[in-house]
Structures are given as structure tokens and as C-alpha cells.
Image (spheres, rainbow, N blue to C red):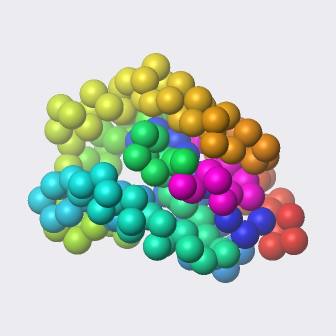
């Protein structure tokens, strides 16, 4: 595996898994949030964002953290060797988003761009709550449209995630 996409709702453990795989496989991790958001949580324009993504995935080795369905998934899935979907219960994801917003509020994170500290607002909470019903079907439709032959791994628990990381080797 040289090119991996990791998707999952806010609080699913997507970034943690991406970083763990990146470390284990010695692959650079591309955080799509970093490419999309500008300081102050201002979104990039579509063309600008797609250009950043295309440049970031031009190499032969990477892990993409996120999907940005409707904006960039067609670019990433077309080059991917593996698609990993973290499918955690809504209650757990919401709890993690809430805890992160309380205990890491106004702190920078490696998966967020400079000038975009951890926050919890109504838009984020609503998106996290609706991930399963709104985003998951879009992501799955794009996966089938643009990368129907890309192998898929679905992870639903901490135990499955840990076993996947343990079993993954550069030759896998």
C-alpha cells in the first residue's frame, strides 16, 4: 500500500489512524482540512482547493486524511490503493467532538491549518450529527463512481483499528 484514503466522521479517530499508518508505513499524511481551510475558518474556493489536492497527491506515496466528497474525492480515489472507512457510532463521535472542543479549545492541531483552532459551533455539531445520513451516502456513491475497484476496509471499533494498524505492513 502506497496511497491510502482514510474517511470517517468528526471524532471517529480518522486523523489518529492516518497518523499511525503514516508513521508505521513511512508515508506522508495529507490532511485535507489543512488544504481547504484558510485562517479564521474561511473556506478555499473549489478550483484553488482542487489544485492544492492535485499537487499534494502528485507523488506516489501518501495517506489522505478525509474525503471532501463533492470537492476532491474524485481526485484522491482515482489514485488510491486502499480506502479505509472508520464507522463509529454517532454517540461516540459526538462525545469525542464535545470533549475535544472543551479540552483542546483554541489549541492548534496538526490536522488543522494555522489560524484555525479547535472550536465547537452549531455548524460543526450539525455536520457531525448528520454525518451518517448525509455524508456517508455521498462518500459511498463517489467511491463507487470513481474508485469501484479500490479495496475497502471498514473499521468499527478501537480493537479493529488497532488490529488493522498492527497487521499493516509496507508490503501489504
Q: Quadrant location of the C terminus?
A: bottom right
The residue under the point 27% across, 32% down is: 125
Q: Is residue 86 magenta?
A: yes
Q: Residue furthest left?
A: 40
- In the image, 104 versus 138, the foreground residue is 138
The residue under the point 25% across, 47% down is: 101
- In the image, 97 versus 74, the foreground residue is 74
User: What segment is highlighted magenta in the picture?
Assistant: 75-91
The residue under the point 63% across, 42% down is: 146
Q: Residue furthest right?
A: 171
Give the percent coordinates (x, y) of residue 60: 67, 75
The residue under the point 12% across, 59% down is: 40
Q: Is residue 88 above or below residue 13?
A: above
Residue 49 in sight from this viewpoint: yes
Q: Is residue 166 above or below residue 131?
A: below
- In the image, 28 versus 149, the foreground residue is 149
Relative to 75, 77 lies left or right: right
Amino acid at each position: 500500500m502506497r496511497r491510502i484514503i482514510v474517511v470517517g466522521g468528526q471524532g471517529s479517530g480518522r486523523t489518529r489512524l492516518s497518523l499511525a499508518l503514516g508513521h508505521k508505513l513511512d508515508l506522508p499524511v495529507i490532511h485535507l482540512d489543512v488544504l481547504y481551510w484558510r485562517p479564521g475558518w474561511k473556506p478555499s474556493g473549489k478550483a484553488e482547493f482542487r489544485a492544492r489536492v492535485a499537487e499534494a497527491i502528485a507523488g506516489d506515496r501518501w495517506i489522505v486524511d478525509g474525503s471532501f466528497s463533492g470537492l476532491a474525492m474524485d481526485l484522491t480515489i482515482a489514485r488510491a490503493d486502499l480506502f479505509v472507512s472508520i464507522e463509529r457510532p454517532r454517540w461516540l463521535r459526538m462525545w469525542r467532538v464535545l470533549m475535544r472542543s472543551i479540552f483542546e479549545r483554541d489549541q492548534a492541531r496538526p490536522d488543522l491549518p494555522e489560524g484555525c483552532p479547535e472550536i465547537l459551533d452549531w455548524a460543526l455539531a450539525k455536520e457531525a450529527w448528520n454525518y451518517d445520513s448525509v455524508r456517508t451516502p455521498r462518500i459511498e456513491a463517489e467511491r463507487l463512481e470513481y474508485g469501484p475497484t479500490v479495496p475497502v476496509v471498514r473499521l468499527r471499533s478501537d480493537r479493529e483499528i488497532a488490529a488493522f494498524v498492527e497487521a499493516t505492513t509496507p508490503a501489504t
